[in-house]
Amino acid sequence: MSKFSMYYDFMDKYEEFYKTVKQAEEEKLQAIMSNNLTKMESSLSAYERIVKQAQQYEEKRLELCKSMGIDGTSFNSVVSHFEGEEKRKLILQKVRLEMLVETVNYLNKKSLEISDIQLRYSEELAKKLPEATNCYNSKGETEPALKGSNLLNKQI
């Protein structure tokens, strides 16, 4: 198998992986917008698996480049090792991957923005309740009224 075929086939699998990442990001966004805790937990678990898979793919890509004797690890440096139709195919593959990654980043950014809005809304709502129901705010800090209260060690 030629260097081009080895690399292109691997990156084709990488591209398919990023299509599943995009789908997972879309599902995460929907779960966050649904306010369904079960869906949110499920999507976060899926996200953790995806991060591990992405790391594995990148490690395999680096190993492949090394085994092929291709110096440089960026897609651009790999593309520079090929000519003609092979180079054109790799450039098109690179563009597709970049679009997928940009979409994933956009969806993740939107999920974070919505989560932040929901947390701020929950904090404001909790402040209006007669009893303090939250120990931590969206920044992971304890509310001033609860500092030093030793809440977890009290008997009920």
Image: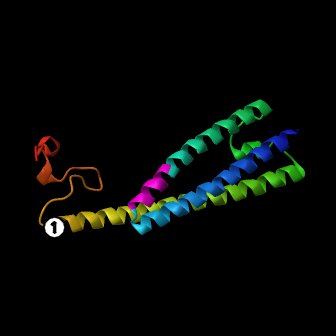
Picture layout, residue 85 above or below residue 61: below
Q: Is residue 120 left or right of residue 115?
A: left
Looking at the picture, tell me which residue is in the foreground, 130 or 111: 130
Picture layout, residue 129 above or below residue 148: below
Q: Is residue 77 left or right of residue 19?
A: right
The image shows residue 125 at horizontal and vertical percentages of: 23, 68
* Residue 110 visible, this orientation: no
Instruction: Name the amino acid, label 1.
Output: Leu
Residue in the image at 68% along x and 43% along y: 74
Q: Work out which residue is located at the far front of the displayed protein and give it.
A: 156
The image shows residue 114 at horizontal and vertical percentages of: 41, 65
* Magenta-colored stretch includes residue 76: no
Q: Pick the quarter of the image with the N terminus.
A: top right
Q: Residues within 10 Å of mark 1 (few under 14, many from 20)?
A: few
Residue in the image at 66% along x and 51% along y: 17
Q: Main secondary structure of the magenta part?
A: helix
Looking at the picture, tell me which residue is in the foreground, 92 or 53: 53
**Highlighted range, magenta:** 37-45
Q: Is residue 69 left or right of residue 21?
A: right
**Residue where numbered disc 1 is placed:** 129
Residue in the image at 43% along x and 68% along y: 33
Determine the secondary structure under disc 1.
loop
The image shows residue 27 at horizontal and vertical percentages of: 53, 62
